[in-house]
Structures are given as C-alpha cells and as structure tokens.
Image (spheres, rainbow, N blue to C red):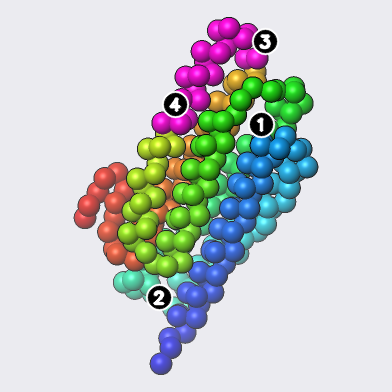
Amino acid sequence: MERIIDSQLEDLKKLMLEMGGQVEKALQTATEGLQKKDNNLFKEVHQFETHINELQIKIDNACLHVLAKQGPVAKDLRLILSIIKINTDLERMGDQCVNIAHLGRELLERSFTSSMQDIETMSACVSKMVKGCLDSFVKMDVVAAQKILEMDDQVDMLKNKVYKDSTELMKVQPQNIQNLMDLILIARNLERLGDHATNVAEDVIFAFSGKDVRHGAND
C-alpha cells in the first residue's frame, strides 16, 4: 500500500526538477548572451529568476507541510532535509545567473571585444555540473553525484586562470581595466555556480546514502 507521504515526496521531487530546469535555462541563456553578445538574452535571464524565486517559496512551504503533517523519519526525513537545502542552492544559482547577465550587459555597453574563450570553457564545465547534479537527484545516483564533486577543481582552475590573465592584461591595457574586472566577476559567479552544484551533489549523496561528505567527511 502506498503511503500518503510517498505521493507528497514525488510532488516535491517534481517541483525541485522544475526549479532545476529553470536554473539550467537561466545559465544557458546567460552563456548564450555572452557568446552572441545579445542583450535580449540577458533580459530573459531575469524572467527565469522570477520563476525560480516563486518555486523556492512553493517548495519551502510544501516541505514544511510534509514535516508538520507526516512527521517523516529515517530516509524520508533525509530526503526532505536535502530538498530544503537544494532549494536554497538552486535559488542562489539563479541569482548568480542574473549577476552574469548584468555584467554581460555592461560589457556590451562598452563594446568589449577581447577573447572570452576561458569564460566559455568555464561556462560549459559549470553547465555540465548543474545538469549532472540534477540528473543524479532524479536517478538517486550517488556515484554520479560523487563525480560532480570531482569536477569542481577544474572550475576553480579556470577561474584562477581568468583572474591571472586579466590582471596581467590590466598592466598593458589600462583602458580595459573595468572590462577585465567584469570578466573576473563573471568567472567568480561561474565558480559560485559550481560551488552550489557541488552542494547539491553532496545533498544527493546524503539523501540517498546517509553519508555526509561535506568538508571531506566520510561518516
């Protein structure tokens, strides 16, 4: 016999996946805006964020309802606690996408033409992390979630490269200091997106295995 909480948990998962889908679209749109230098795409990112914020409130309220009415324990409780944490990370990922769109608009206004190859490489890596952490949640795949944790180092290295290259260019292109600062900030926001994807992966591992792997914990 199906428990009442089972259908409620499925509804929560569906809401979480809807929110995750909006985050993926926001990141993809912000990245395309940078690649195509299209201000209209940057504007679309704000629309995705509005929906993300609405879903955050809806998911929080739904989680509180299940906690209050069903009194979940064991793996059910772990799943709900993980969803609450993932919900927060996804909302912040939406904020990061908006930050990237805002910085992209500023670059367009100043007609910045320098190479953004490292930013594009970084965006592609972060997109894989976001998609991967959400897929691991859908499939309840702890092994796949673990692989997301391993990708974070690559994002950090790319962010450091953007910082180093940009600061070197500032010395010979003082007229481009503001543009190069914006590139650094875009890289920083992409790094934070990767950090949030890592958090989601850690929560997936906790939800479906009971292991807390934050801070290198193994127990």
Where residue 120 appears, as percent x and y from the top left, is 57, 36
Name the N-terminal-most of marks 2 and 4. Answer: 2
Res. 175 mark: 3
Identify the secondary structure beneath mark 3: helix
Where residue 26 appears, as percent x and y from the top left, is 64, 49
State the predominant SS element of the stretch in magenta.
helix
Instruction: Identify the residue under disc 4.
Output: 160
Which quarter of the figure is the C terminus placed in? bottom left
Name the N-terminal-most of marks 1 and 4. Answer: 1
- Neighbour tally class for label 1: few under 14, some 14-19, many 20 plus, Cα within 10 Å: many
Query: Is residue 120 shown left or right of residue 133?
Result: right
Res. 103 mark: 1
Name the N-terminal-most of marks 1 and 2. Answer: 2
Range covered by the magenta-colored residues: 157-177
Residue pictured at 67% horizontal, 10% vertical? 175
Gap in angstroms between the C-alphas marked 3 and 1:
17 Å
